[in-house]
Amino acid sequence: MPSEKIPPCPLAKKCGGCDYQGMPYERQLLEKEKLVKKLLGSMGEVRPILGADTPYHYRNKVHAVFSRKRNGEIISGIYQEGTHRVVPVDACQIENEKADEIIVTIRRLLKSFRIRVYDEDTDFGLLRHVMVRTAAATGQIMVVLVVRTPIFPSKNNFVKALRAVHPEITTVVLNVNERRTSMVLGERNIPIYGKGYIEDVLCGCSFRISPTSFYQVNAAQTERLYKTAMTLARLNKRDRVVDAYCGIGTIGMVAAKTAREVIGVELNKEAVRDAAQNAVRNHMDNIRFVQGDAGMFLEGMADREEQVDVVFMDPPRSGSSEAFLKSLLILKPKKIVYISCNPETQARDLKTLKKDYRVEAIQPVDMFPFCGHVETIVLLQRETL
Ligand code: SAH
């Protein structure tokens, strides 16, 4: 692993985005294993963490906030941890390099197009943030310009100038965020060039990804994560499967290759729209998606006494809900594959499930090199009652 040869990031102190700056990759992996052992080790043996082949430039989604210095100079970068001060960033060791270059180009173009950056204090100006998403397998690139109003002067010429430097950009979207909020993305997306989404390929399935849909940030490790989850689940063609917190339907789609039937549930409307389109795109007629809260959906399934064999669950960092966990205990699937990006809430939720389930495997996967976050798959098997 060549991580020791890379000079430490000059922004490390100010940025605070990397918890493990300057730490050799092998040690980072050991630290994460230690953390998972501490939180989940009492429930079963923790397998060695699955590390990345390369820990650099893996982030396929790059986000920059735009601001002005007192002297009027436009800067772009990230908020200094815990503040609203912007640390200028032109290059980053974990972000996709092309995405970083695009952000620098946009910053340069703003001046000639006389586009004002948004000022939080006065609520004035147009451009708030830029998000760039890249698809590793197809090379497609989406640029999302987060703006305060949908009126973007000379937008066609702006896109033309941007694509003259970066012809690999396949779509440009205006995301309108009118509110005085720290939320990055607003709800309205207006494509001003291309289809308004990008397409990527994972585990042999093709996926479209819209601006506000969740998509894993590290493509290579995501394939490893999903493949491992499938190996652990050992699905067969009689299985009825639930993919809870399904995003654009990635896990469910891979499961549907083997299973009899898959039902995905997801809160974000745009992601559910992507998921439904993704089923068509992959010619799958044994999978469907429901928009709503996963807990409420599972409660409904339990009320109807539906039969479920395997549940994949992949909740956000806050973990799952009591309604969801209680319903799982009523539905009694044979197996639960709990994928989590936060072992603390996962440990909390497992305490509830342990009542009727045996922890069969604990597999950490490193999705976020240089960051303290760790992803863990836990396989639960129903105790034969
Ligand atoms: N399994 C997907 C997404 C995981 S991220 C993947 O691997 O890509 C977690 C997802 O849960 C997000 O898409 C988020 O929108 C969704 N979510 C958050 N709260 C939810 C809830 N209460 N019910 C259903 N989905 C929820």
Image (cartoon, rainbow, N blue to C red):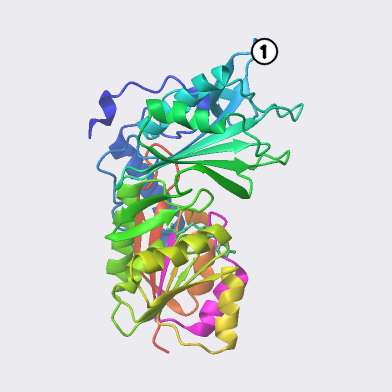
What residue appears at the point 58 percent right and 27 percent down from the top-left corner? 66
Amino acid type for the residue under numbered disc 1: Arg
> x%, y% of residue 163?
41, 31
Q: Is residue 337 above or below residue 88?
A: below
Asked whether residue 326 is in view, the answer is no
User: Dividing the image into 4 quarters, which one contains the C terminus?
Assistant: bottom left
Queried whether the magenta region covers residue 316, the answer comes back as yes
Q: Is residue 299 visible?
A: yes
Q: How far across and how far down the image is residue 77, in percent?
A: 53, 26
Task: Please report the bounds of the magenta region as a residue range.
Answer: 313-339
Q: Is mark 1 within 8 Å of ligand 1?
A: no
Q: What secondary structure is found at the residue carrying circle 1?
A: loop
Identify which residue is drawn at 53% across, 54% down: 317
Q: Write down the residue under mark 1.
A: 70
12 within the magenta span: no
Relative to 303, say whether 338 is above or below: above
* Front residue (pair 336, 349): 336
Q: Residue at x 43, y 59 (%)?
A: 40
Where, by quadrant of the figure, is residue 141 drawn?
A: top left
Q: The N terminus lies in which quarter of the figure?
A: top left
Q: Position of residue 156 (x, y in %)?
A: 52, 33
Q: Quadrant of residue 206?
A: bottom left
Q: Is residue 323 left or right of residue 315?
A: right
> Which residue of the protein is positioned furthest toward the left in this rendering?
1
Neighbour tally class for label 1: few under 14, some 14-19, many 20 plus, Cα within 10 Å? few
Task: Judge from the rendering whether residue 114 lies leftward or rightward of residue 283; answer left or right.
Answer: right
